[in-house]
Image: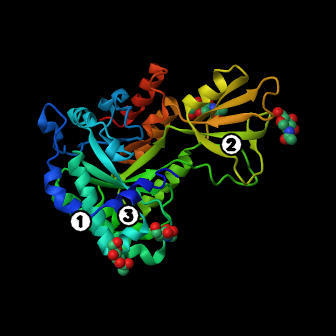
Amino acid sequence: MVCYICIFCLILINLASSTDIADHNRRSTSTCPCEDASLCEPIPPAKGKTRLAYSKEPGNWKYYDFTKITEMVLFFDITEIDPEIVCVAHKYNVQLHLRGCFGNETFRNSTKQEKWIQENLKLLTDYHLDGINVDYERPRIAQWEPQLVDFMVELSIRVRSMNSNYQLTYCLPTDPLLHYEMVTIPTVMDYLMIMDYDHVWDIHPNHCFATANQQPMKTIFGLTKYMSLGIPPSKLVVGMPWYGYLYNCDNITSSGLCSLHNCPYINTRQSIIPKIYENYVVNGNYEFIQGWDNETVSPFLTIIPKDNIDSFPRQFWYDNSVSLTRKAEIYKPFQIRGVGVFHVDCLDYTMDQSMVTAYWNFFTVFQD
Ligand SMILES: *[C@@H]1O[C@H](CO)[C@@H](O)[C@H](O)[C@H]1NC(C)=O
Ligand SMILES: *[C@@H]1O[C@H](CO)[C@@H](O)[C@H](O)[C@H]1NC(C)=O
Ligand SMILES: *[C@@H]1O[C@H](CO)[C@@H](O)[C@H](O)[C@H]1NC(C)=O
Ligand SMILES: *[C@@H]1O[C@H](CO)[C@@H](O)[C@H](O)[C@H]1NC(C)=O
């Protein structure tokens, strides 16, 4: 459940009108925010490995380390962009990508599809961006397959004819269940962003314990399947999580496992380190046991209430710079194109600078 449902995108589609299209040429030369106007030109894709970051907070870019990445998806309402990010990102040769969201109504109606393409191409030029990351996270209906594929083929032609520096990329789940998306779509995309997170939703009812957000065994299983479908590893980017899962435990077993209540219904929610710190660490009402699971190559924190302030213990499974680095080193021999992080605003940039630096340093596993 990464890229959520883009309510904004739907609104945008509905608001798009033919006058926008007539407006296109004038607006496309929208004022360059950079002192050096050449920084507003689309920049070519990086030649080496891909190091992609998803940004969800338009105001956080000043804290990012652009020397560590090659591209960034602006995963928010693009009208909220701070225009200056373009100057800085492009100065460091980092491409900025628009998130591309749509519903089935877009590719099932040629009028709407054309409107979507024109609107999004306009956003690319208006905001001086370098590509689109397509994220269609909706139910897949077999009879709509050809239309979705045609839409992606058309989008690719249009994006590439507009500027040869533009990249077009596509989000897919860990396990390639949908074979139809595996034939034509990969050939028209620069790469596929495999969302290798949320691996927690298939916990076995007979082994109901808290577990890691990204599990290398599942990632590798998925990568192998993609490759067996003929997709070259050079088109696969492995998505890594910077968020974790907080579980309510029935009990902590003698070996430190968190047994889950009401299994197979999984009582868990996504969380991030700053929230754990805020909710459990600072108030002093909890004890903590730091754990490490070799099988999933992941750390976890057992959170035990003191003085019965809560009736149950918790466990937070997350990724830190050590687990991210080790996992990336496990995937690297598969000759994948690189890694992507969802998302870089899971850190509190005002909190612990050494932690921030360590997380961003993880990208260097794929720095050539
Ligand atoms: C198709 O799109 C319509 C209109 O947005 C929506 O109501 C419907 O739920 C969608 N169907 C599927 C299966 O996604
Ligand atoms: C396609 O969308 C357009 C614009 O929203 C609408 O006018 C038209 O009726 C739709 N066509 C079909 C077949 O639904
Ligand atoms: C809870 O864990 C303890 C060990 O920490 C174990 O002795 C006990 O049997 C467990 N209780 C249940 C209900 O699983
Ligand atoms: C965990 O993995 C590390 C590195 O592979 C290894 O050195 C260590 O012995 C393992 N620990 C356990 C308990 O399996």
Secondary structure beneath label 3: loop
Amino acid type at circle 1 is: Ser
In this picture, is 43 found above or below 274? below
Q: Residues within 10 Å of mark 3 (few under 14, many from 20)?
A: few
**Residue, x 39% and y 45% (percent of image)?**
76
Left or right: 367 as drawn, with respect to 205: left
Q: Which residue carries the number 2 mark?
A: 210
Comparing labels 2 and 3, the label whose residue is closer to the camera:
2
- In percent of width and height, residue 41 lies at 15, 43
The front one of 60 and 328 is 60
Amino acid type at circle 3 is: Gly
Q: Which residue carries the number 3 mark?
A: 230
- In percent of width and height, residue 337 lies at 34, 47
CA–CA distance in space, label 2 to label 1? 52 Å
Secondary structure beneath label 1: helix
Q: Which mark is residue 139?
A: none
Secondary structure beneath label 2: loop
- Asked whether the viewer can see residue 140, the reply is no
Q: Residues within 10 Å of mark 2 (few under 14, many from 20)?
A: many
